[in-house]
Image: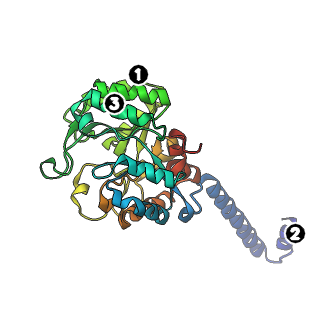
Amino acid sequence: MTLFFRNALMQSDDQQALRLLLVYFMRRFLLLALGMGLLLTKPVYSEPDKLLFVDAHSQLPNSQLSDEIIHLLNQAGIKKVILSHRRLAKNKDILTLSDKYPNRVFPIIKTKGKKWKEGDYNKFTKNIERKLKKGKYYGFGEAILFHAAKGKDGLAAPEVNVSTSSDQFIYLLGKARERNWPLPIHIEFRSVNNFSKRMKELENILDNNKDISFPLMHMGQLDTENVSRLIENHKNVYFMMSQAHAREGKRKEWSQPWTTLFSKNNKRIKDEWKNLLIKYPDRFIFCIDAVWPRNWSKHYVKRVNLWRKALKELPQSVVEQIAYKNAERLWDLTN
């Protein structure tokens, strides 16, 4: 800097010296502003293409897809999947997959079905106890409290309405507590008849069972205001990001009132949701919840890649918690 001033003052023209001084200070100002900008801007995930996920909840719909699943996980960059079964698939199918791929497939116990819906306590608990004795599971599948009918006349999926005071739900609470397992809850708040009543019931469960973690499937179909309020008031509530991806195609499944985190262009996460993810990165859990055979196809890879591209706008520490660390912690997948 001393040399700079000496050269400037040696100019015979005072105006030239002043011009040089102004240029110098403008350059210094720009460098300082750029440096401050770099310090104030949160670093984004630097290598999104290399990001691996844990799919914290998906379902095997039939045994024929067993071999295809691992191929799709590899294509999508899913390092682990927490897997239940439904429809034509059997419990032995997910156990066989887990035995074959012990560090990739983590089976959970299916809870939904006729016994759950109709409150057949004896048959329901007998089935659960038989599976628990195997010692091969990492948790329970979703406990459905309210599931709106899907498809024409509920043919795709019937309505399910189970009270938090039901014997089967109280039983699951006890078993989850015994094993230190999270208990995923499925309740579609945008479809319930009495929002306030069902929300109060949920919050009573959260308050009275603070030693149990409760991930809400499909973001609970809640908006940012309710999600933020629940997180601030309850340390044991989490949000599963299934069905919260951008909408591709025009299938009837997209007509459901799911909570979507994406903007209309299907490329980026809305600012209000981005702010929540950054503020509470330990409360959101990535999952796809592939249910139908068509979900276990190229569409599975496409959905994962949508998230991979969108999450690159977030800080690296936030992305890693959402993508896999939260799931590995809650379901104890690292041991």
- 10 Å neighbourhood of mark 2: few (<14), some, or many (≥20)? few
> In front here: 24 or 284?
284
Picture disc at residue 301: none
Mark 1 and mark 3 lie on one chain; the one further toward the N terminus is 3
| Residue 329 image position (x, y, % from top left) | 54, 41
Residue denoted by label 1? 208
Label 3 vs label 2, nearer the camera: 3
Residue that badge 3 annotates: 126
Q: Earlier in the sequence, mark 2 or mark 1?
A: 2
The residue at which mark 2 appears reads as 3
Please give the name of the residue rendered at 25% of the width and 48% of the height, measured from the top-left corner: 257
Q: CA distance from mark 3 to mark 2?
A: 87 Å
> Which quadrant would the N terminus be assigned to in this image?
bottom right
Q: How far apart, in angstroms, are the residues tagged by discs 1 and 3? A: 26 Å
Sequence-earlier tag: 3 or 2:
2
Camera-side mark, 1 or 3: 3
Left or right placement of residue 43 versus residue 249 in this view:
right
Considering every residue shown, the one lying at the far top of the view is 208
- Residue 23: x percent and y percent? 71, 70
Viewer-nearest residue: 148 or 227: 148
